[in-house]
Amino acid sequence: MSQSIRYPEILEIARREGKVTVEGLAEHFGVTLQTIRRDLSDLADAGRLERVHGGAVLPSGTTNIGYEDRRGLNADGKAAMASACAAEIPHDCSVFLNIGTSTEAVADRLLAHRNILAVTNNLNVAATLARNPDCEVVVTAGALRRSDGGLTGDLTERTIRQFKFDIAVIGCSAIDEEGDILDFDMQEVGVTRTIIEQSRKVFLVADHTKFRRKAPVRVAALSELAALFTDAPPPRAIVTRCRELGVRLDVAKG
């Protein structure tokens, strides 16, 4: 069966069931797992699906992919850009890391840093950085979001306003070609805005999938960043905007 025949049926199954799996599709079509992975990658590159661990889901402009699925999405790319970001964070500094799988990856690359104060509203980041004896970890107050270990709300924002950070490391759900940084959760966006206001430099870690996605809530503009770390060349419009605004663009190779 050719790709041109499989693709519409894969999309129909995704619309009907909400998600497709590599193993399920391979059995359904009687082809290899490698063939289905290639099909899903092609459909993701075309913006028709979004890859998640073990399969794919339909793209959404109003709801985010589940947290565990996001954790398994493009792990190599996230690791590469996290390493590049962490390399730009010096010893002897204060840093904020917010909610997200990409910021969790950065936290893992900070375990050898010395004498840093790390503040976070991400319980997963806090647990990771607790393994670094030379890192003082402060967790903000706030309402716990059980799905991803994030803390949000007015209490979180009030905690953040007590600090002035050397560097903030933030993630996002999408970046559009106008240079707007976007997310899904309005409470989380309010926290991110406060982080940006309280930081001398802001680093955004966003893998290449974020340039194909849509989200409804505006977080910030590229002009508010010191650097954007990603894992593949962004669209030309983003490259041009970064150059015009003096925002460092770091494309790490996974």
Image (cartoon, rainbow, N blue to C red):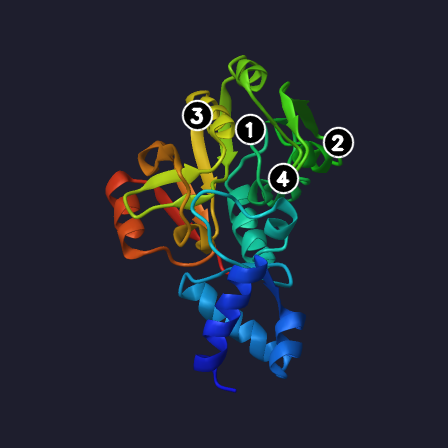
Quadrant in the rendering for residue 121: top right
Q: Secondary structure at mark 3?
A: helix
At mark 2, the secondary structure is: loop
Q: Residues within 10 Å of mark 3 (few under 14, many from 20)?
A: some
**Which residue has dot 3 on it?**
193
The amino acid pointed to by label 3 is Arg
Q: Earlier in the sequence, mark 1 or mark 3?
A: 1
Please report the residue visible at 68 percent of the width from the left and 32 percent of the height from the top.
123
Q: Of discs 2 and 1, which sits in the foreground? A: 1
Instruction: Give the spatial CA distance, label 1 vs label 4.
Output: 10 Å
Question: Marks 3/4: CA distance?
Answer: 20 Å
Which label's residue is closer to the chain start, 4 or 2? 4
Q: How far is mark 2 from mark 3, CA to CA?
A: 30 Å
**In the image shown, does 254 or 22 lie closer to the viewer?**
22
Question: Residue 107 — which label?
Answer: 4
Q: Is residue 120 above or below residue 238?
A: above
Residue picked out by circle 1: 96
Name the kind of residue labelled 4 in the image.
Ala
For label 2, the residue is 133
The amino acid type of the residue labelled 1 equals Phe
Q: Which amino acid is tagged 2?
A: Pro
Counting other residues with Cα less than 10 Å from the Cα at mark 4, is it few (<14), some (14-19), or many (20 or more)? many
Mark found first going from the N terminus, 3 or 4: 4
- Front-lying residue, 9 or 157: 9
